[in-house]
């Protein structure tokens, strides 16, 4: 119980990951990916991503009239993770995954770009995942350091846009779309 109401909680472990469902008055009022949760005045949901940095997302929700509103969101990489230790070919993927998770891209960026870090999400748009380019991409563009950003278009329909990332001394120095 929290927010003055009682809910039935079902925490399921599925092949795709764990989910939390909350039910009130016979209907599902909350459905989110969650490795763990606490309900103590507010609902706190924790989710660890299977990305390069092992990001953990902790979100708190307030409930009013059966609707849940996100109040806070904290994203952090696993303890001891250092993007500068990544191979240059992997660094752009880790950067894009950090942005998709809502994390701070600054640790991945060269000093000249860190002041622009907050603008990256708008520049790249609302992508939801990062993917490797298929082999045909490399036949067309050569062995460039690019990643595919996955954008939701409609329910179960996605577009992929590719972005190059230039890396020097273990830091991203430029991001540009593949034409």
Image (cartoon, rainbow, N blue to C red):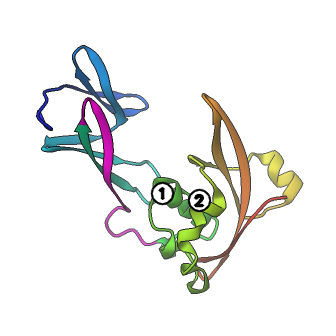
Q: In the rendered view, does 27 fall on the left or right side of 103?
A: left
Q: Residue at left 52%, top 60%?
A: 99
Question: Residue 177 lies in what quarter of the image?
Answer: bottom right
Q: Nearer the viewer, residue 67 or 22?
A: 67
In the image, residue 173 above or below residue 76: below
Q: Is residue 27 above or below residue 47?
A: above
Q: Is residue 36 left or right of residue 157?
A: left
Q: Give the residue at mark 2.
A: 93
Coordinates of residue 88 in the picture (x, y in percent): 62, 71
Relative side of 138 to 169, left or right: right
Residue 7, position as x, y percentages in the image:
17, 26
Pick whichever, 128 or 3, lies toward us.
3
Q: Which residues are magenta?
A: 64-82
Using the rendered image of the protein, determine whether residue 90 is visible from the camera's viewpoint.
no
**Residue at left 56%, top 46%?**
128
Q: Residue furthest right?
A: 140
For this orientation, the residue located farthest to the front is 65
- Give the numbered dot on residue 162: none
Residue 163 is situated, as x and y percent measured from the top left of the image, at 72, 60
Q: SS of the residue at dot 1?
A: loop
Answer few, some or many: residues within 10 Å of disc 2's Cα (few below 14, many 20 plus, some between 14 and 19): many
Q: Earlier in the sequence, mark 2 or mark 1?
A: 1
* Apparent side of residue 79 relative to residue 93 in the rendered image (left or right): left
Give the structural element (helix, strand or loop) at label 2.
Answer: helix
Is 79 covered by the magenta stretch? yes
Q: Check disc 1 and report the residue beneath it.
A: 52
Numbered disc total: 2
* Cα distance between the residues tagged 2 and 1: 8 Å
């Amino acid at each position: 119980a929290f927010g003055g109401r009682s809910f039935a909680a079902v925490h399921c472990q599925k092949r795709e990951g764990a989910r939390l469902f909350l039910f009130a008055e016979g209907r599902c009022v909350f459905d989110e990916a969650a490795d763990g949760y606490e309900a103590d005045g507010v609902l706190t949901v924790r989710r660890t991503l299977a990305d390069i940095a092992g990001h953990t997302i902790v979100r708190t929700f307030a409930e009013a009239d059966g609707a849940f509103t996100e109040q806070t969101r904290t994203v952090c990489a696993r303890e001891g993770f250092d993007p500068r230790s990544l191979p240059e070919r992997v660094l752009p993927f880790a950067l894009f995954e950090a942005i998709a998770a809502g994390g701070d891209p600054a640790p991945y960026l060269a000093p000249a770009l860190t002041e622009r870090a907050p603008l990256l999400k708008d520049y790249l748009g609302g992508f939801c995942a990062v993917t490797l380019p298929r082999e045909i991409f490399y036949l067309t563009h050569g062995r460039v350091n690019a990643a595919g950003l996955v954008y939701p278009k409609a329910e179960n329909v996605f577009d992929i846009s590719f972005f190059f990332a230039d890396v020097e001394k273990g830091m991203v120095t430029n991001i540009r779309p593949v034409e």
